[in-house]
Image (cartoon, rainbow, N blue to C red):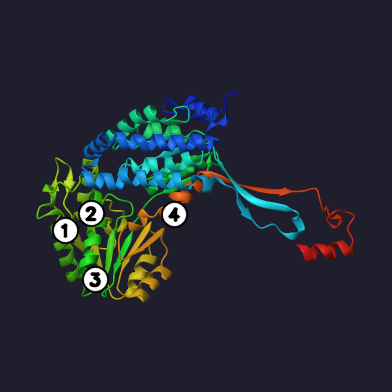
Amino acid sequence: MANRPVLHAVENGICFVDTVNALKNSFSTGKTRSLDWRRGQLENLKRMLIENEHDILKALKADLGKCETEAYTSECGYLLSDIEHTLKHLNKWTKPRRVSTPIVAWPGKSFQQPEPLGTVLIIGAWNYPLQLLLAPYVAALAAGNCAVLKPSELSPATSSLVARLIPQYMDTTTVTVVEGAKDEATALLACHWDHIFYTGGEVVGKIVMAAAARHLTPVTLELGGKSPCIVDKHTNLKVTARRLVWGKWMNSGQTCIAPDYVLVEKGQENQLIDAIKKELKSQYGKDPLASRDFGNIVNTRHLQRLKEYLEGAPVVYGGQIDEARPAMSPTIVLNPSVDSKVMQEEIFGPILPIVTVASLDDAIEFINQRPKPLALYAFSDDDSVLEKIIAQTSSGSVCTNDTMMFMTNPELPFGGVGNSGMGNYHGRAGFDTFSHLKTVMKRAFALDAPFRYAPYSKLKLSLLKKLL
């Protein structure tokens, strides 16, 4: 089959025409449609993670200072669980999905048939550089697609390792890893894809969407934003603080679904702050920067960004800096100005603003006046409070009385709404994202009712009105 043209795919002297065309031609052979092939590739990916666990954990330590437990659970272990879930359900996901057929179309049957989209581009993020690159790939692979994987250049050790390992384990006629920075990403976006999956920030998300629009390419954008957390006055304060500390300061706060700020009723803030301080010392010790379990900021540029957030901010705990690592200790600020950067921009770091409000209604209004977040958290012993928050706010996901744990359930689709993203994945939702659910109606030649054909009459119209 002749190469399909990839228009306008040269940017800054970089061209991926041959790469993309080779993948498209490989897809056209039909090899990726085979369930045996898909299963084999998923098994190979699983083997890659297991056999290279040491090197993966070492790379994550080099890029982000992740401790072994955090790196394994949030990256390797997460992906292995994702692959196992996919293998378990793949046969079911690929089967036709029957729907009812109206009487006027009898005899016949109707269904949706999942089919792969083709050749897709997956752009990963630096904060979870393995998980956020390979989890979408698991879904794309399960759906039967070819793919280009673009790791983040801000996590160079993991990027280099993925580029080395993928060709050793996977079918290189169906997947390619492209390393690089802005120029390479721009050249890739100039190509014609069947789907683009991007994880990152809103600014680049708009660039991705604009590039995709030139070819009418569908996109999945997993962005972020300021995920709020409401702590009700009626709550288990000890457990609330423990789970809040875990969710906020994992990966030094560099998580798109980490609680970005906390809303608490005025008069309750000091109790909450004291509980958080106590829990921080319990999890990371008196000097978190000396803890082996507390990670780094990805680079000095991002550390400088975080330092600027603290300029003039009312810091009530933490704020210590280690320029050499680089790192910042867990930091709490109380009632910063709503116009300050720390309250206007996604923090993506170990700073937690605590904002006091007059009531639960004020907390809900505070959230609703801002862009829709990727995640929303609420802590309360009162179910009516939790139900009110769920009903009266909009967010990509909601988790009550915990943080981030919804990510452990592959049956729950993950994705944003509004500025926090579009589209979703995880489990069957990921399979569907990278599939076209083709509509099919199969009919027989029997019972070819004449009233549907011209010439028409009042009798035919009467029958059609009853049957349609």
Compare marks 4 and 3 and give the one earlier in the sequence. Answer: 3
SS label for mark 3: loop
Question: In the picture, residue 465 is in which quadrant?
Answer: bottom right
Q: Residue furthest left?
A: 286
* Few, some or many residues within 10 Å of mark 2 (<14, 14–19, 20+): many
Earlier-in-chain disc, 3 versus 1: 3
Amino acid tagged 4: Pro
Is the C-beta separation of discs 3 and 1 under 8 Å?
no
Q: Secondary structure at mark 2?
A: helix
- Mark 1 crowd level (few <14, some 14–19, many ≥20, 10 Å Cα): many
Going from the N terminus, do you reach mark 1 or mark 2 first?
2
Place of residue 174 in the rendered image (x, y in percent of width and height, measured from the top left): 47, 30
Amino acid on which disc 1 is placed: Leu
Helix, strand, or loop for circle 1?
A: helix
Question: Is residue 419 visible to us here?
Answer: yes
Per the model, the C-alpha gap separating discs 1 and 2 is: 9 Å
Name the front one of labels 3 and 1.
3
Question: How far apart are labels 3 and 1 at the CA level?
Answer: 17 Å
Q: Mark 4 falls on what kind of element?
A: loop
- Mark identifier at residue 236: 3
Tag 1 near tag 2, CB within 8 Å = yes
Q: Tag on residue 249? A: 2
Q: Is the Cβ of the residue at disc 4 closer than 8 Å to that at disc 3?
A: no
Identified at 88% across, 64% down, the residue is 459
Name the residue rendered at 36%, 52% in the picture: 224
Q: Are marks 4 and 1 in contact (CB under 8 Å)?
A: no
